[in-house]
Amino acid sequence: MTPLPQSLPPVLARWLDFADDAVFVIDGTGCILYANAKTGQLTGQDPAALVGKVLERDFAGSFSSRWASGRDQARQTGQPAEYEAPSPLLGGWVRVRVVPQGDLLAVQLRDVTPLRHAEALQALSAALAAARTPAAVLGALLRGAVAASGAATGHIVDGLGQPLQATADSPFPAPDLLAEVGRSGQLAFRTAAPVPLVALPLRVEEEVWGVLGLSFRQGERRHFAPAERAFLEALVQQGAQALGRVLAEERLARQGEVLATLGRVGPSIAAELDLGRLMQAVTDAGVSLCGAAYGALFYNPSGADSFPLYTLSGAAREAFADFPPPRPTQVFGLTLTGQAVVRSGDITRDPRFGHNAPYQGMPPGHLPVRSYLGVPVVSRAGTVLGALLFGHPEPDRFDERAEQLLVGLAAQAAVALDNARLYQELREERARLEGRVAERTRALAEEAAALEAFVRFTEAVGTRTDARALAQEALKVFRSFFAECSAAYYEREGEEWRARVWTDDIALEVVASITGGISREAPAFAQAERTREPVFVDGWNADEQQVAATEAYRTVALYPLTVGAAVPAMLAVGLKTEAQWSERGRAIVRSAGRSLALSLERAGMAGQLAEQRDALAARTRALEAFADLSRDLTLEADDGRLIRRAQEIVLSLLPDGYSVYWEPEERWVKRSQVGDLRSEVLQRDLDAGLPLRETPTLDGPYQTGEPLYLDTYDRDRDGLGDRVAHITAVASLPVRVGDVVRGVMVVGLFGGRRWTGTDRAVLDTVARSLGLTLEGAGKARALQQRTQELERSNAELERFAYVASHDLQEPLRTIASFTELIVKRHAHSLDPQGRRYLDFVVGGAERMKRLIDDLLVFSRLNAVEEPLVPVASAEALAEALGRLHSTITASGARVVTGELPAVLGAPGELVQLFQNLMGNAVKFRREGVPPAVEVGAVREGAFWHFTVRDNGIGFEPEYAERVFQMFQRLNRREHYEGTGMGLAIVRKIVERAGGRVWAEGTPGVGSTFHFTLRAAEEERGA
């Protein structure tokens, strides 16, 4: 229990022991008279042990420097004194209240650390928020940390230990501690003598940017409790965050400044399209932006190893006149190859400097360079266009901002250089185009003169197609444009060129020369014909050119007039006063020659098109006529009528003439004639016929199968002499029926006329169509005749079968009746052999009756066609089963039927069909196996598909068709009775109803018969 002064009531002493504040009393000498429990807790001693100790002696360094002034103030004024100060003993802040009473002092210590720390952090936040520079941030942090921690001094150094700011001029007591924290990034606290120290790292973007160091008073006791350490760390974190913010703002500001600067410089660079001025502007702008003493742009768009100096700024060009361009050395290489920017504070101390011969550094007389900055200029396509190099005689003149500015400038310069280079190329291309346009303009002007002349020529000949008339107009054009000009139009005849049209100025001896013929081997003529290009001969030599009497001409032009692949004509122009052809003169010759050639070719093409059109129209009329003939053709029409109609078609498409059709027998026989021969004598000769093998006009086409066209008919060709003098042109056309030439159709024309391509097309078409028509008519008649014979034969067979089967009934009944009488009256008198013979007769008669009955049914199906009407197939089957009732009952057969539809058929015939199929199913059963028959039908489109399936003896698949043939049996009569007609009748009934029937079988398993019949509703729908 704390000893109490005599005047201190016990209850008060007890209350003080439980108080949160430390309370103690000292006398005038500083001796402790009383201390409560909290005071003992702060000092780490028992309160009773504190009594008698001298405060300032025994607890030196445990209280702040404010204690002495507060103590003295209370003693001097006799009034309580109060202050707040950092407490080394507490490791925080305390509010101290000193109350005097005589020479005694009562002291109260209250812990206000949380409040003061919160106020300190709030004040620091406000100061940091107002800071706009790193220095301001560091100053606010330094001041706030010193004040909040109660430190004596504070220092801030960078990550390398270089001082940045301090609150005192004296250095930090332990710089090694700051360096260690800068390397490790860990907090450090020293509590040992001589002074307590704290080192706190400033982390910005995960890197140690700097270190805050705090030093306390000498002799001061600091324990740096966890709460105090956390507070100091919070202070530093706030400062680091603010520092990061300010640094980011500075970076953004620098970037904005770079962009603004580039924005000011960029437009002027981008607007410059002259390559020289552009590069000088880039170099000047670079020097201005980075503060260099001089700069240079080395330009190399070709990609060669050398980078020549293009522009220089800040120095005369002569300063570099004696030095070679930079090479890709260790200093320049990264920049010249476009790999990186090179920036050096002092290039002379850079380890990459001074390694290249012959100078091992800068050559003598070189501009002094300490600060160096090299930036590559790279195009958008990745091509290194050059390099921007800057220097300054003083060190450390280029910072990061300068580098960023020049990198941006280089990027803009690359784009501008690309644009300027493209602009220069465009200007060069434009100059080339303008030169070509000027050249073309001159050519067009020269051609315009020729075209102006040719306008008159075109207007004059636009409606003509005659070659010589066109040439005459062209020669007038030359005469109107050239002085002392002669011109001629030549046509080729064999191996010579002959003038057909010429200007009237040509001398008679020249006319005689050019109309008499010029050899195709004459040099100028041969060259023009061979090359198909105009030939201009300057310095004409008549002897060398092999054109006699043309010595008066000094220059001659020859223009070949081509039509397709041929050169049928030539245009010649000679000048007497000109020594050589001018471009204008050549243009006129070319223009007139080309236009005349096109006119001739166009006229030729028009003629060909007209001829082809006429041929097509004539061929079409011939085919239409034959089409009408074929439509009207009947089987009774004879060949003579067809031949005569063909002759009429031919003469309707040709001018005045005749046509005779011949066929060979012992002589050439006239089968048909259309048109008057205009000679009674010739008519009598032709009516009498012409000799075989002595009439080439007929013999040749008949033997070769090829038509013969004679534009001029020789009167002696066929031995007819003057009788055919009035006939000018003859065509002989073989008429081929199938693979055989049947005859020859001759067409003759009166008057002077030749066979045109249109005529030949018409005649060939008529002859070919006639042959096809005759062949078709013959085949049609043969087919009709064959059809009639088959119909007659079938009718006779049907009548025979019907009559024969009907007439056989009477004798068969007679045989049966008398045989029955013999059995009744005389059977007892016959021996067994006789009775057996009689049984044979009875059995044969019964089989004959069944066969005749089946024949009657079959023949009646052919002879009498009952109309097809809707029939309920179920009723037809029921009636058939009724007829077979005894047979089915005797055999023990089981018949299963499904739902059967209505179909189109004859009612009696459908009953017969089911009776035959069901009878066979029961008849051809396996021994010991009761017959089982299934009848069903399914719909298949417009038909019903019926099946009759049994379990009988079946048959081999190869007999599936044979079973439907008349009188065909697959089994011996001794085993199974029958006539072999049942299934033939079935097929006849089904096919007459428009269906089909087939069968499937497996020996020992059974058979299935299929047939189809049209659905009854189909007829109503139709």
Image (cartoon, grey):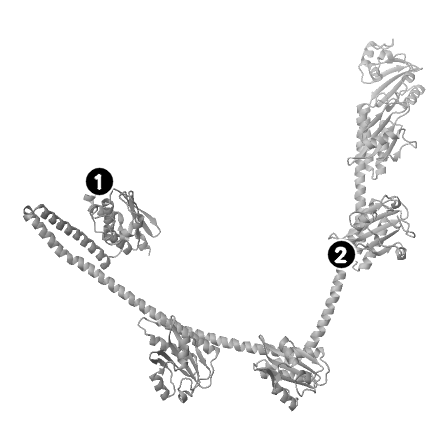
Question: Does residue 1005 lie above or below 997 as drawn?
Answer: above
Between 167 and 553, the residue placed more toward the observer is 553
Image position of 131 (left or right of 653): right
Label 1 with label 2: CB-CB less than 8 Å: no
Identified at 86% across, 31% down, the residue is 178
Residue 196, position as x, y percentages in the image: 87, 25
Between 388 and 793, the residue placed more toward the observer is 793
Between 781 and 67, the residue placed more toward the observer is 781
Residue 451, position as x, y percentages in the image: 66, 78
Name the mark nearer the viewer: 1 or 2: 1
In the picture of the structure, the residue carrying the numbered disc 1 is: 892
Quadrant placement of the N terminus? top right
* Number of other residues with Cα within 10 Å of mark 2, as a class: few under 14, some 14 to 19, many 20 or more: many
Image position of 900 (left or right of 238): left
Q: What numbered label is drawn on residue 418?
A: 2
Residue 954, position as x, y percentages in the image: 28, 45
Quadrant placement of the C terminus? bottom left
* Number of other residues with Cα within 10 Å of mark 1, as a class: few under 14, some 14 to 19, many 20 or more: some
| Furthest-top residue in this view | 6
**Which quadrant of the structure image shows residue 645?**
bottom left
**Which quadrant of the structure image shows residue 82?**
top right
Provide the secondary structure element on which disc 1 rests: loop
Question: Does residue 566 lie above or below 345 as drawn?
Answer: below
Question: Does residue 772 lie above or below 84 as drawn?
Answer: below
Q: In this view of the protein, can residue 832 be seen by the observer?
A: yes
Provide the secondary structure element on which disc 2 rests: helix
Q: Amino acid at mark 2?
A: Asp
Q: CA distance from mark 1 to mark 2?
A: 110 Å
Identified at 75% across, 53% down, the residue is 383
Q: In this view of the protein, can residue 898 be seen by the observer?
A: no
Q: Amino acid at mark 1?
A: Gly
